[in-house]
Amino acid sequence: MAARHANMITMSRTAPASNAAPTASATGKPSPSINNLADLRNSGWRSRSVKEELRANFTRALAHPSSARSSSEYPPVSNAPLFPGILGYDDTVLPEIANAVLAGHDMLFLGEKGQGKSKLMRLLPAFLDEWVPYLDIAGSPVHEDPEAPITRAGRDFLAANPPESVRIAWWHRSERYAERLAPGTKFADVIGEIDPAKLMSGTSMSAEDALHFGLIPRQHRGIFAMNELPDLDELVQVGLFNILEERDVQIRGYPVRFSLDLLVLFSANPSTYNRSGKVIPQLKDRIGSTIVTHYPRARDLGISIMKQEAGVDLGGEFPVLVPPFMEEIIEEISRVARTSRYVDHASGVSARFSIANFRTTVANARRRGIALGEKPSVARISDLAHLKASAIGKLELDLMGSHQMTEDQAIDAIVSEAIANVFGEYVDAHGLSEIADVFAKGVRVEVGDMLASAHYAQSLKSVPEAWNKAFEVNASENAAVRASCVEFMLAGLWATQRISRSEKHGRVSYEVRPS
């Protein structure tokens, strides 16, 4: 089956200009050596908002893709992808993100689990300047803009000191992103709370100095992301609405106003986001762009994502080979689950399901190789018997109307359908249904995930037609590859109801179905 490759949008990213030599920083990365406000102003640095910063860097990236990643942190790479590691979104999701960045919008990433929402959000800081300066004030809870501090303490400090005495420090873009999971999040966590100790020292409750800053004010001049927005307490949603629209924070009824500079991101599942009462309408209305994500629309693209994210080393002392049809079956299992009547569709089936199943299949094949001394060990259908361990917790099964099926039976049915789908494509291409005629003569073949490959050769000596025909799906003289091919053919014939299968003590036997 021909593989399809996604056409990736490209980008570039450059660091802010600086004539000064770099110095060491808390991040371990070199930072500009300018350390006072007078030198900063003389350098030509200009204050700008987070969204202006993102827009400018993103625009430069789109206009000059060949200069991608030219900062000291990233070596020059021609035609580097806009969002590294993101596949299948170049015609759908990525253009919408690009428009949102250029429009200066806060964003909601709306999609089912395992569609890369968090990964996309975590890649946006790449478009920030590598370093931004801030006022180096002891005890300051925020990274103040040297030209536009938002706290009274920052403004007083700037007014009371000459530029040569105002110290400047530098904030790296890797630290300008914060993320929070909505369930259990309280108002004090993300917005702030009145500090009792400051009240005891005589500070008025209505004064800004009485406030203990939460995560969002501390991310001033950065990016803040809230995952699973519909699960956020309504009181906190109101606080976020005020931040997005009014810049007004009310702590226990006292208004404290800050000109917070933020890009705010959200993620949500459609089934909960669209449910009445889960997200207040005022907050929905203030979110600039909704970015709708989706699962891979083609199986081969899903395979590419699965292999990329699994990060499995197939080499080493005990190498593993995964035939193409096994990759297709593992991804097809997820695709079948997404439409299966046994699965709760409101929850979705994450790409992590395919990733975990791929890792489990490779792990079991490697275990067999270690035990039997086969190099390479080749993944087989019988390795899929261990996928139930991968499925627990990743599939939300809906068995209420499924004739009292157990969880194991539901997973077996999904795997069987996936095998049948992939096998049907190979039958159309190779005419493999002829093998069923051999089994009609009374042939019985036993398979198992811990059977040596030589066992298959011995079992099929009496049926050379089946042996040779099976190898048309993956031509090889390697006994382990041949064993995998034979298992695929046998499982496919069973899944399409051409032969029967029985299991005993971990061994599976295939034979002709009684008439």
Image (cartoon, rainbow, N blue to C red):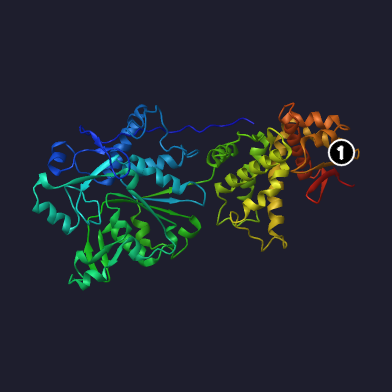
Quadrant occupied by the N terminus: top right
Q: Residues within 10 Å of mark 1 (few under 14, many from 20)?
A: many
As displayed, is residue 214 above or below residue 254?
above
Residue at (69% x, 55% y) in the render: 410
User: Hey, which quadrant is residue 71 in on the image?
Assistant: top left
User: Hey, which quadrant is residue 164 in on the image?
Assistant: top left
Query: 496 or 139: which is nearer to us?
Result: 139
Query: 36 or 501: which is nearer to us?
Result: 36
Q: Tell me the residue that label 1 is attached to.
A: 439
Residue 209's spot in the image, x, y percent?
A: 20, 64
As displayed, is residue 386 above or below residue 433?
below
Residue at (40% x, 43% y) in the render: 123
Q: Amino acid at mark 1?
A: Phe
Query: 180 or 72: which is nearer to us?
Result: 72
Residue 296's spot in the image, x, y percent?
A: 54, 42
SS at badge 1:
helix
For residue 58, side relative to residue 183 (left or right): left
Q: Is residue 513 visible?
A: yes
Q: Is residue 339 visible?
A: no
Residue 408's spot in the image, x, y percent?
A: 70, 56
For residue 227, side relative to residue 324 (left or right): left
For residue 175, side relative to residue 444 (left or right): left
Query: 9 or 289: which is nearer to us?
Result: 9
